Image (cartoon, rainbow, N blue to C red):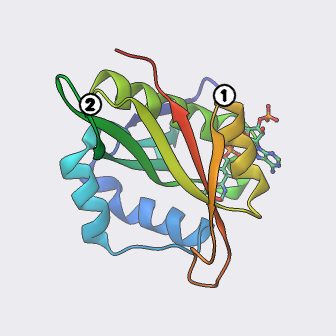
Amino acid sequence: MHPKIKLRVFEPKDLERVMYINRTCLPENYPSYFFMDHFKRFPETFLVAEDDGAVVGYIMCRIESDLLNFRPFGIAKKGHTISIAVLPEYRRQGIGYALLSRALEAMTMKYGARECYLEVRVSNTPAVNLYKKLGFEVKKVIRGYYADGEDAYVMVKKLPIR
Ligand SMILES: CC(C)(COP(=O)(O)OP(=O)(O)OC[C@H]1O[C@@H](n2cnc3c(N)ncnc32)[C@H](O)[C@@H]1OP(=O)(O)O)[C@@H](O)C(=O)NCCC(=O)NCCS
């Protein structure tokens, strides 16, 4: 990634720009309260990439309790990547990789998550390759997951113990 690209946590002033990037890059769009709810509950895993003060990409995640996986010292936690996007003219420069790497680190170090999972369109080769490059594996296929009927891969990566 070019040294002038900086990562930082999302701030409320970024909301409009992040929503613009979301609408530009993905068919799955959300109302502003959805972004703000993730910011309020999981601020460390809502990150933006900036080029000279302009936000050019983001990742938004949440932390979930794995109620099927009780452990001696509490319920296991999972990170769930909800949305990641980089503006087209900034792609293929390592920004997506850096955003997801930093979010995975925060899931582990700040929230104690033991794995991360996400859904991705089976046709989304750039994203699937990004996730594989970071060690995610396809765990299952959910038929007709998306509004237009496309299938999703559920991809999972175990996280190191903090
Ligand atoms: C997926 C996305 C976030 C990747 O962002 P990016 O900044 O371009 O990704 P990076 O430059 O960090 O690429 C990391 C790896 O991802 C894979 N990758 C990225 N773009 C790719 C492409 N167009 N074709 C194939 N593989 C690709 C490669 O393995 C790449 O590593 P390499 O450059 O060493 O080959 C970006 O393409 C995007 O915003 N897409 C639209 C939104 C989207 O689909 N989000 C995911 C929803 S689940």
Three-letter amino acid code of the residue under disc 1? Met
Residue toward you, 46 or 155: 155
Asked if ligand 1 lies within 8 A of label 1, the reply is yes
Q: Quadrant of residue 35?
A: bottom left
Residue 32: x %, y % from top left: 30, 70
Q: Is residue 102 left or right of residue 9?
A: right
Residue 54: x %, y % from top left: 49, 48
In the rendered image of this protein, does residue 13 appear above or below residue 104? below
Residue under label 1? 1
Cα separation between marks 2 and 1: 26 Å
**Is disc 1 placed on a helix, strand or loop?**
loop
Residue toward you, 18 or 156: 156
Q: Are marks 2 and 1 in contact (CB under 8 Å)?
A: no
Three-letter amino acid code of the residue under disc 2? Tyr
User: Which residue corresponds to the image point at 39% horizontal and 48% vertical from the top-left?
Assistant: 61
Report crowding for label 1: few under 14, some 14 to 19, many 20 or more residues within 10 A (C-alpha). Answer: few
User: Which residue corresponds to the image point at 25% horizontal and 60% vertical from the top-left?
Assistant: 36
Choose mark 2 or mark 1, whichever is in front.
Answer: 2
In the rendered image of this protein, does residue 65 appear above or below residue 18? above
Q: Quadrant of the N terminus?
A: top right
Residue toward you, 21 or 115: 115
User: Which residue corresponds to the image point at 61% horizontal and 41% vertical from the top-left?
Assistant: 96
Q: Which mark is residue 90?
A: none
Q: Is residue 49 left or right of residue 78?
A: right
**Is disc 2 placed on a helix, strand or loop?**
loop
Report crowding for label 2: few under 14, some 14 to 19, many 20 or more residues within 10 A (C-alpha). Answer: some
User: Which residue corresponds to the image point at 64% horizontal and 31% vertical from the top-left?
Assistant: 134
Residue 22: x %, y % from top left: 51, 65
Residue under label 2? 111
Q: Is residue 73 left or right of residue 140?
A: left
Residue 17: x %, y % from top left: 43, 61
